[in-house]
DNA sequence: TTGAAAGCGCTACCAC
DNA sequence: GTGGTAGCGCTTTCAA
C-alpha cells in the first residue's frame, strides 16, 4: 500500500531551487504565478521544474493553504441507475464549488460500508450519501465529520438528511390515471422490512384525494424480475386492475416486461407509472411515465448543507432539507 | 472556496496533548493504535480527543506518511451507461488496493476537461480515464503525472492506454448469426469522424471469415434515437437484411426500438447484437445479445498499470494493455 | 525582486 | 511507557 518502495526520492521544491539557483520562496512564487518576480527568473525556475519533473506535494500545500475541500460520496452500488443519477447530481453540484468528490462504492455490503467509513474519515472533510449503518455506528466511525444522509430518517441531531417528498408528484400521477379513465389502480410496493412504504402512503392519499379506495398492493423485490413477478401476482388476483403505480422505475420496468409477457399492451391494456425519473426510463419500450425526483435539487441541497456544516454556518433545517418530485409523462401512462 | 472563514481554530494534536496532560507523540500513539502505551493513558487521550472533537489533518498525516494514493478518474458523462460501468470497474479495482478515487465528470465538455485536468494535477497521484484533449495538451496539463488512457490511440511514449480488442468477440457474434441462418447481416456503425470504425473492421473480418461479404452499413449517432433511425435507413435500402451488428449497446437498443416500430419482431424477423455488454441490455425487451467488454479486466488493467507507473516498476507494454470482449447471448439474437 | 526564517500538523526516531 | 527533537514540503510573513 505504500507508494514508496525503492522508488526514486521525491523531487522537492528545494531541488528546483538549487537547480535554478534561487531560493525556495522564489520557486514558489514562480509556480504560483505570484507577481513580484523577474520574468527571466521565473522562466528559469519553470524550466528547472519541468526538467526535473517537479510536482508540488498536495499534502504540503494543503497543510499550509487550507483551501481544498474533498467530500466522500458513499453509495451502495454505482451500477444501480438510481445511485448513478444521484452520484452524477452530487458530482455536478460539488464541481460548481470546486470541491473534489471521492467516490466509494460499497458494493451493497454493509461491512464494506463500515470499512469505507473508517478509511474515509481520515481522508475527506465530509461524508455524504446513502448509509445503511445504524446511527451510533456512523457516529462512531465518522467521528466529528459532517455527515449528510440522503433519503434516510435519522433520530439524532448529529446528522442531516435530505428527505424525498413525492406526495405532490404521486398525487399528480394518480390524478392523471383517473382522468384517463382508470378506476382500478394497483401498486407494486417494495418488499422491504417497513411495510407499507412511505410511497404507498402517498399512493393511498392520492387515491383518496380522487375519491377512490387505495387499490391492491403487491410486493416487489427491487429488481426488474421483482417487478415482473409482482405484476403477475397482482394481476392474477385482481384482473380488473388497469393501471399500476410502482415503487420505483426499476420495478416499473419489470412491470412493463411482465405486461408484455402477459399479453397486455402498455398503455392500452395497462398503464404503468414509476418513481425516480431515471433516464433509463426513456430507453425502454414504451418509454416510462414516472414521478421524477428532482436529482439536481437533491445534489444542490446535499452540497449546500455540507457547505454550511463545514463552515459552521447555520445549517438548513429539517423542513428545508426536502426535495420534490413531479410527474413526467412519457408513454406508459 | 476557502474553508476557513471565521470558523473556530482547528483542534490540533497539541490541544489534545495539553488537555490529556501528555505529549503529542503519546497522543499520536494512542490514536494510531501503536503499542508502547499505557492503557489508562491511552484512554485518557482518547477521551480528550473525543471531547475536543479532534480530527487529525489528512494533509499533515499525508505529508509524513506517504502512503495514501488518490487517482483521478476523468469521464465524460457518468450518466452514460458505458462510462458508468467503466467507472464502477475502476472503483472496484482501486478499492482492492486501498486507493481513493476522485471522480470528475466533465459533462462531455472539452473546456471542462481542460479545467479538470488542471485542477486534478495538483490533487491526485495519477490520472486515468477518457480524455479527448490532444496529447500535447494532456501532457502540458498533467505535467509529469502518470496518465492511463482508456480506449484511445496515443502516439507519444508519454502515455499508457488500454486498448479494446473486440475482434474475437465480434467474430463469435457473426459466426453465431451465420449459424442461425443469417446471410444478410448489416452494421450500424458510429457516425464519428474516423469512418469506418475499428469495430467495423472487426465486423468485416468476421464476415469474411464466414465467407460472406461485409454487409451494408448505416451510420448512427451514438444514441437510442440514432440507432433507431440508422436501422430504418438500413432496412429501407436493404430490406433483405435479417440481422444487424451495432456499434454499441445504446445504438443496438435503438435498433430494437426501430425494429418494433417497423413491425419486425426481434429476433424472429431481425436479429440484433450490440457491443459493450452493458447491464442495461438485460433490462430491455428482448434482452440484448452483445459482445461484452470485460470491464473488470479493464478496471484491473488500468489500476495495475497506474500502480507500475507510480512505483517506477516496469510498466506493462502495449501488447499487454489489451482487454478482450466476448459474445454474451441473451435473446435478441 | 529576492531570501531567511517560521510554522502548517503530524509521525519517526531516538533518548530517557 | 513516555517525551524531546527533527523533519515531511510547502507558503507566508518580514527583512534586505
Image: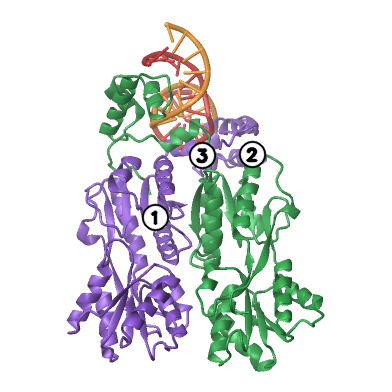
Chain colours: A purple, B green, C orange, D red
**For the residues carrying marks 1 and 3, which lies nearer the camera in this image?**
3
Residue contact at pointers 2 and 3, CB within 8 angstroms: no
Asked whether the viewer can see residue A167, the reply is no
Asked whether the viewer can see residue A153, the reply is yes
According to the picture, the residue beneath numbered tag 3 turns out to be B68
According to the picture, the residue beneath numbered tag 2 turns out to be B311
According to the picture, the residue beneath numbered tag 1 turns out to be A97
Left or right? Give the position of A244 relative to B316: left
Left or right? Give the position of D6 relative to A232: right
The chain to which mark 3 is attached is B
Closest to the observer, A263 or A59: A263
**What's the residue at 50%, 31% (across, down)?**
B65
SS at mark 2? helix
Q: Position of residue A28 (x, y in %)?
A: 52, 37
CA separation in Å, label 1 and label 3 = 24 Å
Closest to the observer, B324 or A149: B324
Dot 3: within a 10 Å radius of its alpha carbon, few (fewer than 14), some, or many (20 or more) residues? some
Closest to the observer, B67 or D6: B67
SS at mark 1? loop
**For the residues carrying marks 2 and 1, which lies nearer the camera in this image?**
2
Closest to the observer, A19 or A257: A257
The chain to which mark 2 is attached is B
Left or right? Give the position of B184 relative to A281: right
* Same chain letter for marks 2 and 3: yes
Marks 2 and 3, the one that precedes in the sequence = 3
Give the quadrant of residue A145: top left
Dot 2: within a 10 Å radius of its alpha carbon, few (fewer than 14), some, or many (20 or more) residues? some
CA separation in Å, label 2 and label 1 = 33 Å
**Relative to B183, does residue B68 appear above or below in the rendering?**
above
SS at mark 3? loop
**What's the residue at 20%, 81% (across, down)?**
A213
Amino acid at each position: 500500500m505504500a507508494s514508496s518502495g525503492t522508488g526514486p526520492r521525491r523531487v522537492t521544491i528545494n531541488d528546483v531551487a538549487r537547480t535554478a539557483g534561487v531560493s525556495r520562496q522564489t520557486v514558489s512564487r514562480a509556480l504560483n504565478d505570484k507577481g513580484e518576480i523577474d520574468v527571466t527568473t521565473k522562466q528559469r525556475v519553470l524550466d528547472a521544474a519541468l526538467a526535473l519533473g517537479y510536482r508540488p506535494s498536495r499534502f504540503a500545500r494543503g497543510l499550509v493553504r487550507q483551501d481544498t475541500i474533498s467530500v466522500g460520496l458513499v453509495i451502495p452500488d454505482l451500477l444501480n441507475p438510481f445511485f448513478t443519477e444521484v452520484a452524477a447530481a452530487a458530482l455536478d453540484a460539488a464541481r460548481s464549488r470546486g470541491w473534489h468528490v471521492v467516490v466509494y462504492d460499497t458494493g451493497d455490503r454493509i461491512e464494506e460500508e463500515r470499512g469505507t467509513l473508517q478509511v474515509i474519515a481520515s481522508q475527506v472533510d465530509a461524508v455524504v450519501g446513502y448509509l445503511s449503518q445504524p446511527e451510533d455506528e456512523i457516529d462512531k466511525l465518522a467521528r466529528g465529520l459532517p455527515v449528510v444522509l440522503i433519503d434516510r430518517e435519522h433520530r439524532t441531531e448529529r446528522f442531516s438528511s435530505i428527505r424525498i417528498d413525492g406526495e405532490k408528484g404521486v398525487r399528480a400521477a394518480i390524478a392523471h390515471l383517473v382522468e384517463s379513465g382508470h378506476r382500478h389502480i394497483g401498486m407494486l410496493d417494495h418488499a422491504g422490512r417497513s411495510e407499507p412504504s412511505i410511497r404507498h402512503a402517498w399512493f393511498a392519499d392520492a387515491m383518496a384525494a380522487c375519491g377512490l379506495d387505495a387499490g391492491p398492493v403487491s410486493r416487489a423485490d427491487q429488481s426488474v424480475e421483482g417487478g415482473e413477478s409482482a405484476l403477475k401476482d397482482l394481476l392474477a388476483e385482481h384482473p380488473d386492475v388497469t393501471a399500476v403505480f410502482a415503487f420505483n422505475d426499476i420495478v416499473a420496468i419489470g412491470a412493463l416486461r411482465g405486461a408484455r409477457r402477459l399479453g397486455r399492451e402498455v398503455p392500452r391494456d395497462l398503464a404503468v407509472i414509476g418513481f425516480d425519473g431515471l433516464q433509463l426510463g426513456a430507453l425502454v419500450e414504451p418509454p416510462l411515465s414516472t414521478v421524477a425526483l428532482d436529482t439536481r435539487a437533491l445534489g444542490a441541497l446535499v452540497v449546500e448543507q455540507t457547505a454550511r456544516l463545514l463552515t459552521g454556518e447555520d445549517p438548513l433545517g429539517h423542513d428545508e432539507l426536502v426535495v420534490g418530485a413531479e410527474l413526467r409523462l412519457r408513454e406508459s401512462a
